[in-house]
């Protein structure tokens, strides 16, 4: 219903203006691709509240990374021109275009994203608090923790969120860990309790299991 997205208190609309085939399984991507599919102006015309793009590092061909950076530089300038927030999603990849938890790459592209003019960064949690704290210090803008693949253990997910928030995360960008959950409304309330109310993991679990 379009009315749900109009007026005070409406959900924010974030428009992705690029595409990649890194998640395709058949046929498996070899060098893979990154391409801009819309200008930032389109987000403004559609009434979006922000623009989001990928920053992929780890290509076998450095020219692909250069093309990605070139596209982001242009998109970022457009976002400034139209005064719309610019979110960059930096992802570390390897041959075959698979996402990897390579902290050396992750901290590099978080820094690059912040220096390219991102207003917010949507990044993977690197696996431990100490590493995430380093990423937060490297970035000049808030980091939103990317949900990534669906996590099977609720306690593990909530603990990761708690650790990230305590180390300076600006918030979350979760998709399938909410809408693929058997109780989406409750997991959302549990996450909200940690992020916005500074509640414990145990309290969040009690909200989930009521």
Image (cartoon, rainbow, N blue to C red):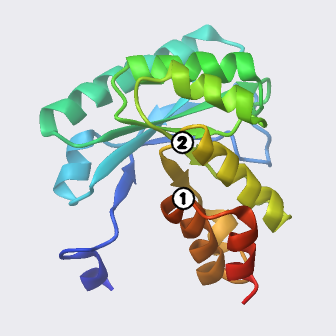
Residue projecting furthest to the bottom = 210
- Considering the image in quadrants, where does the C terminus appear? bottom right
Residue 148 in view, yes or no: no
- Left or right, 148 with reference to 15: right
Q: CA distance from mark 2 to mark 1?
A: 9 Å
Of callouts 2 and 1, the N-terminal one: 2
Query: Residue 126 falls in which quadrant of the image?
Result: top right
Vertical position of residue 51 compared to residue 201: above or below = above
Quadrant of residue 21 within the rendered picture: top right
What residue do we see at 61% from left, 64% from top? 199
Q: Is residue 55 visible?
A: yes
Say which element carries label 1: helix
**18 or 99: nearer the eye?**
99
Q: How many marks?
A: 2
What residue sits right under mark 2 in the picture?
169
Mark 1 Cα shell of 10 Å, populated few (<14), some (14-19), many (≥20): many
Instruction: Say whether residue 63 is left or right of residue 9.
Output: right
Q: Whole-percent x and y of residue 127?
A: 78, 37
Q: Secondary structure at mark 2?
A: loop
The foreground one among 124 and 78 is 124
**Residue 40: percent from the left, percent from the top?**
26, 41
Between 128 and 62, the one lying in front of the other is 128
Residue under the image location 34 percent in, 34 percent down:
119
Depth check, front residue: 208 or 23: 208
At horizontal 66% and vertical 12% (from top left) the residue drawn is: 61
Crowding at mark 2 (Cα within 10 Å: few <14, some 14-19, many 20+): many
Numbered label attached to residue 55:
none
Q: Position of residue 179 (x, y in %)?
A: 63, 73
Up/down of 178 relative to 82, above or below: below
Q: Residue furthest top?
A: 62
Query: Looking at the rendered structure, which numbered label has been put on residue 195?
Result: 1
């Amino acid at each position: 219903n379009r009315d749900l997205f109009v007026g005070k208190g409406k959900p924010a609309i974030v428009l992705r203006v690029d595409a990649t085939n890194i998640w395709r399984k058949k046929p498996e991507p070899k060098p893979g691709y990154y391409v801009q599919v819309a200008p930032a102006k389109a987000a403004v015309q559609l009434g979006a509240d922000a623009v989001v793009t990928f920053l992929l590092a780890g290509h076998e061909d450095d020219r692909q990374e250069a093309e990605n950076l070139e596209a982001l530089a242009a998109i970022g300038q457009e976002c400034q021109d139209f005064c719309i927030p610019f979110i960059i999603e930096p992802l570390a990849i390897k041959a075959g275009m698979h996402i990897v938890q390579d902290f050396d790459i992750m901290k590099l592209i978080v820094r690059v994203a912040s220096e390219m003019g991102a207003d917010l960064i949507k990044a993977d949690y690197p696996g431990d608090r100490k590493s995430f704290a380093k990423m937060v210090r490297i970035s000049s803008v808030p980091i939103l923790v990317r949900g990534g693949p669906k996590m099977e253990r609720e306690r593990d997910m909530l603990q990761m969120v708690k650790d990230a928030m305590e180390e300076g995360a600006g918030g979350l960008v979760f998709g399938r860990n909410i809408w693929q959950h058997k109780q989406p409304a409750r997991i959302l309330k549990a996450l909200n309790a940690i992020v916005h109310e500074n509640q414990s993991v145990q309290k969040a679990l009690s909200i989930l299991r009521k």
